[in-house]
Amino acid sequence: MDQHDVSPGPSLDVGKALANRVYPLVRPNLHSIRPYVPGRPAKDVQLEFGLTDVVKLASNENPVGPSPHAVAAAQRVLAALNRYPDGATQDIRHAIAQHMNIAIDSILVGNGSDEVLKMLSETFLQPGDEVIVPSPTFPQYAFGASVMDAKTVQVPLLADFQYDLPGMLEQVNDKTKLIYLCSPNNPTGTWLTHKQVARFLAQLPKHVLLILDEAYREYIDTEDPLDSVEFIRQGWPVLSLRTFSKVYGLAALRIGYVIGDPGIVAFMDHVREPFNVNAIAQAAAIAALEDQDHVKHVQSANRLGREQLYAGLRRLHIPFVATQGNFILAEVGDGRAVFEAMQRKGVIVRTGFPGIESYIRITIGTSEDNDRCLTALAQALA
Ligand SMILES: *Cc1c(COP(=O)(O)O)cnc(C)c1O
């Protein structure tokens, strides 16, 4: 960025001139941060290509939708929008605590787990501190570190997208404060077993906090699933991130949370805004949590969709990564070209993950969505 040496001239508008003058006031570490690029909204693509019906399989959204009970609970809040929400998020934390059989003080709720991630960074990171993450993974860990002027050390996943846990341990030094492990990992779908994390924790130096992002944990249907609550109960320096955006289908409401030892979680309350979680989200999340039948329905739909996409990808001879999430990473050659060709057919997927440009990530949709996706993919590759 070199906006500060743009010389003022007659064509330069006032806004630009002001921006240039203010440039030196902005914290220098912010200049290198690139804004998060979300999956393209279906409406944009619909307008651009003159399509009537677009399928968005780009943001790992739940294709089934929220529980009808959650929708009803959200509606019941609407008449009281003049009131501030419960700043202590008492009822939703109570519901989570009961559901998971943990203490209410081990839970902190945020405006999506995105906000919780930022609070983690604000609580623990100073300029010069280091954070270790796998690569590729969810970009918000590095974002939080950049905002605080901390350094993110990226440890590439291994050839089969397995986590390089010894490689991550090797990167730990005196400046390391946080290690992030996302399991199942976005965007690869690969996952860690409980035993793998137990071994990792046993080797982790005492001054480091391990953050397990389990946004997709409810989709796991394999052996030895990670049980972060057990680690927390045993007193390991572990925090677990959860969200209502995925299996509970409440992405639009923005509600997620962290669980950990109450002693650790209490520090994060120092950076929390007074009313960080809106009232609609709190009410809907409680109802969503109570509707575990809906969760089971979403889980089984995801399993069926996964098998459908696996079979379709095999038919097309497209290699893919076995997943425990609600998305599949597939190797298509030129990811960008395939993404664009599929978009013209009205199917939005995701590509451009750093270091794996030959892949696209497909969110598992409804059976019709998946069929359309496979058809568009076949056409894109033809
Ligand atoms: C989707 C996702 C989240 C959830 O973010 P919210 O802010 O709660 O919507 C968190 N972590 C990962 C890895 C994700 O993919």
Image (cartoon, rainbow, N blue to C red):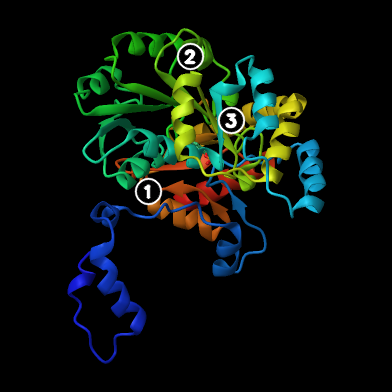
The residue closer to the viewer here, 343 or 83, is 83
> What kind of element bears circle 3?
helix
The residue closer to the viewer here, 278 or 49, is 278
> What kind of element bears circle 1?
loop
Q: Residues within 10 Å of mark 2 (few under 14, many from 20)?
A: some
The residue that label 1 is drawn on is 352
Measured as percent of width and height from the top left, residue 346 is found at 58, 57
Question: Residue 277: in sight, yes or no?
Answer: yes
Question: Residue 183: in sight, yes or no?
Answer: no
- Horizontal arrangement in the rendering, residue 243 relative to residue 143 (left or right): right
> What kind of element bears circle 2?
helix
What amino acid is at disc 3?
Arg
Measured as percent of width and height from the top left, residue 244 is found at 62, 35
Q: Residues within 10 Å of mark 3 (few under 14, many from 20)?
A: many
Quadrant of the rendered image containing residue 211? top left
Is 7 above or below relative to 121? below
**C-alpha separation, residue under disc 3 versus residue under disc 1:** 22 Å
The residue that label 2 is drawn on is 232
What amino acid is at disc 2?
Ile
Q: Nearer the viewer, mark 2 or mark 3?
A: 2
What amino acid is at disc 1?
Gly
Q: Is mark 1 within 8 Å of ligand 1?
A: no
- Horizontal arrangement in the rendering, residue 361 relative to residue 95 (left or right): left
Q: Is mark 2 within 8 Å of ligand 1?
A: no
Q: Nearer the viewer, mark 3 or mark 1?
A: 1
